[in-house]
Amino acid sequence: KTYRNLNGFDASLQFSSWIYRIAHNEAISWYRKKNVRPEGHLIADSEEMLSFLSSKEEGADVTFDKNVNAQRVNQALMEIDEKYREVIILRFFEHKEYEEISDILKIPVGSVGTLLHRGKKQLAAALNKDAIRI
Protein backbone atom coordinates (compact mmCIF):
# COMPACT_ATOMS: atom_id res chain seq x y z
CA LYS A 1 0.00 0.00 0.00
CA THR A 2 2.89 2.35 0.74
CA TYR A 3 4.37 1.78 -2.70
CA ARG A 4 1.04 2.39 -4.43
CA ASN A 5 0.59 5.69 -2.59
CA LEU A 6 4.11 7.11 -2.90
CA ASN A 7 2.84 9.88 -5.16
CA GLY A 8 0.58 11.02 -2.31
CA PHE A 9 3.49 11.54 0.10
CA ASP A 10 3.82 15.13 1.33
CA ALA A 11 7.55 15.90 1.35
CA SER A 12 7.07 18.49 4.11
CA LEU A 13 6.22 15.65 6.53
CA GLN A 14 8.49 12.97 7.96
CA PHE A 15 8.51 9.78 5.90
CA SER A 16 8.41 7.61 9.05
CA SER A 17 5.24 9.39 10.24
CA TRP A 18 3.60 8.80 6.88
CA ILE A 19 4.42 5.08 6.88
CA TYR A 20 3.31 4.77 10.51
CA ARG A 21 -0.03 6.34 9.61
CA ILE A 22 -0.55 3.92 6.71
CA ALA A 23 0.23 0.94 8.98
CA HIS A 24 -2.05 2.35 11.69
CA ASN A 25 -4.95 2.78 9.26
CA GLU A 26 -4.44 -0.71 7.84
CA ALA A 27 -4.51 -2.22 11.33
CA ILE A 28 -7.72 -0.38 12.18
CA SER A 29 -9.30 -1.49 8.89
CA TRP A 30 -8.32 -5.09 9.58
CA TYR A 31 -9.83 -5.00 13.08
CA ARG A 32 -13.02 -3.45 11.73
CA LYS A 33 -13.27 -6.09 9.00
CA LYS A 34 -12.76 -8.88 11.53
CA ASN A 35 -15.08 -7.08 13.96
CA VAL A 36 -12.65 -7.65 16.81
CA ARG A 37 -10.82 -5.41 19.19
CA PRO A 38 -7.22 -5.90 20.25
CA GLU A 39 -6.96 -7.29 23.74
CA GLY A 40 -4.28 -8.11 26.19
CA HIS A 41 -0.82 -6.80 26.59
CA LEU A 42 -0.13 -3.88 24.32
CA ILE A 43 2.72 -2.62 26.42
CA ALA A 44 3.21 -4.76 29.52
CA ASP A 45 5.29 -7.32 27.63
CA SER A 46 7.47 -4.76 25.91
CA GLU A 47 11.01 -4.06 26.96
CA GLU A 48 10.28 -0.33 27.10
CA MET A 49 7.69 -0.82 29.83
CA LEU A 50 9.89 -3.12 31.88
CA SER A 51 12.95 -0.91 31.58
CA PHE A 52 10.76 2.10 32.35
CA LEU A 53 9.67 0.49 35.59
CA SER A 54 12.71 -1.47 36.73
CA SER A 55 16.45 -1.23 37.00
CA LYS A 56 19.13 -3.90 37.09
CA GLU A 57 20.21 -3.03 40.64
CA GLU A 58 16.89 -3.98 42.22
CA GLY A 59 16.01 -7.27 43.84
CA ALA A 60 13.59 -9.83 42.45
CA ASP A 61 10.78 -8.69 44.76
CA VAL A 62 10.99 -5.08 43.57
CA THR A 63 11.19 -6.18 39.94
CA PHE A 64 8.13 -8.41 40.49
CA ASP A 65 6.19 -5.52 42.03
CA LYS A 66 7.10 -3.29 39.11
CA ASN A 67 6.05 -5.99 36.66
CA VAL A 68 2.67 -6.18 38.40
CA ASN A 69 2.44 -2.38 38.18
CA ALA A 70 3.29 -2.57 34.47
CA GLN A 71 0.36 -4.93 33.98
CA ARG A 72 -1.91 -2.55 35.88
CA VAL A 73 -0.73 0.39 33.77
CA ASN A 74 -1.52 -1.65 30.66
CA GLN A 75 -4.99 -2.46 31.99
CA ALA A 76 -5.56 1.20 32.86
CA LEU A 77 -4.48 2.22 29.35
CA MET A 78 -7.12 -0.11 27.92
CA GLU A 79 -9.77 1.64 30.05
CA ILE A 80 -9.15 5.19 28.80
CA ASP A 81 -10.58 6.65 25.60
CA GLU A 82 -8.82 5.42 22.47
CA LYS A 83 -7.92 8.94 21.31
CA TYR A 84 -6.02 9.53 24.56
CA ARG A 85 -4.48 6.06 24.67
CA GLU A 86 -3.10 6.47 21.17
CA VAL A 87 -1.40 9.79 21.98
CA ILE A 88 0.01 8.50 25.29
CA ILE A 89 1.47 5.40 23.62
CA LEU A 90 3.02 7.44 20.81
CA ARG A 91 4.54 9.96 23.22
CA PHE A 92 5.69 7.88 26.17
CA PHE A 93 6.26 4.40 24.75
CA GLU A 94 7.26 5.15 21.18
CA HIS A 95 9.06 8.38 22.18
CA LYS A 96 7.54 10.50 19.40
CA GLU A 97 7.77 14.30 19.47
CA TYR A 98 4.60 16.42 19.43
CA GLU A 99 5.17 17.38 15.79
CA GLU A 100 5.51 13.76 14.71
CA ILE A 101 2.40 12.74 16.66
CA SER A 102 0.61 15.62 14.94
CA ASP A 103 1.72 14.31 11.53
CA ILE A 104 0.76 10.71 12.34
CA LEU A 105 -2.69 11.52 13.71
CA LYS A 106 -3.37 14.44 11.34
CA ILE A 107 -4.23 16.81 14.20
CA PRO A 108 -2.80 20.21 15.18
CA VAL A 109 0.24 20.22 17.47
CA GLY A 110 -1.76 22.08 20.13
CA SER A 111 -4.32 19.29 20.14
CA VAL A 112 -1.55 16.78 20.86
CA GLY A 113 -0.77 18.62 24.11
CA THR A 114 -4.45 18.81 25.03
CA LEU A 115 -5.01 15.11 24.34
CA LEU A 116 -1.91 14.20 26.36
CA HIS A 117 -3.06 16.29 29.32
CA ARG A 118 -6.57 14.82 29.28
CA GLY A 119 -5.23 11.33 28.67
CA LYS A 120 -2.87 11.54 31.63
CA LYS A 121 -5.78 12.67 33.81
CA GLN A 122 -7.88 9.69 32.67
CA LEU A 123 -4.95 7.34 33.14
CA ALA A 124 -4.30 8.68 36.65
CA ALA A 125 -7.99 8.23 37.51
CA ALA A 126 -7.94 4.65 36.21
CA LEU A 127 -4.79 3.91 38.20
CA ASN A 128 -6.13 5.60 41.35
CA LYS A 129 -9.15 3.35 41.08
CA ASP A 130 -6.70 0.50 41.67
CA ALA A 131 -4.75 2.54 44.26
CA ILE A 132 -1.63 3.03 42.11
CA ARG A 133 0.06 6.41 42.22
CA ILE A 134 2.12 7.70 39.31
Image: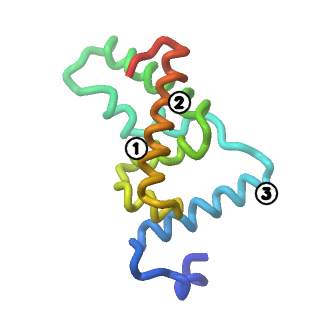
Earlier sequence position, callout 3 versus callout 2: 3
- Residue depicted at 80% across the width and 49% down the height: 35
Question: CA–CA distance between discs 3 and 2?
Answer: 29 Å
Question: CA–CA distance between discs 1 and 2?
Answer: 17 Å
Q: Are marks 1 and 2 in contact (CB under 8 Å)?
A: no
Q: Nearer the viewer, residue 27 or 122?
A: 122
Given the image, on which type of amino acid does mark 1 rest?
Answer: Phe
Earlier sequence position, callout 1 versus callout 2: 1
Q: Nearer the viewer, mark 3 or mark 2?
A: 2
Q: Nearer the viewer, residue 117 or 39?
A: 117
Q: Secondary structure at mark 3?
A: helix
Given the image, on which type of amino acid does mark 2 rest?
Answer: Gln
Q: Secondary structure at mark 1?
A: helix
- Residue depicted at 65% across the width and 37% down the height: 39
131 vs 57: above or below: above
The image shows residue 50 at horizontal and vertical percentages of: 37, 32
Q: Residue 122: which numbered mark, if any?
A: 2
Q: Residue 33: which numbered mark, if any?
A: 3
Residue position for label 1: 93
The image quarter containing residue 55 is top left
The image shows residue 57 at horizontal and vertical percentages of: 19, 22
Which residue extends farthest left? 57
Q: Quadrant of the C terminus?
A: top left
Earlier sequence position, callout 1 versus callout 3: 3
Q: Are marks 1 and 3 in contact (CB under 8 Å)?
A: no
The image quarter containing residue 37 is top right
Question: CA–CA distance between discs 1 and 3?
Answer: 27 Å
127 vs 87: above or below: above
Given the image, on which type of amino acid does mark 3 rest?
Answer: Lys
The image shows residue 120 at horizontal and vertical percentages of: 45, 33
72 vs 117: above or below: above
Q: Secondary structure at mark 2?
A: helix
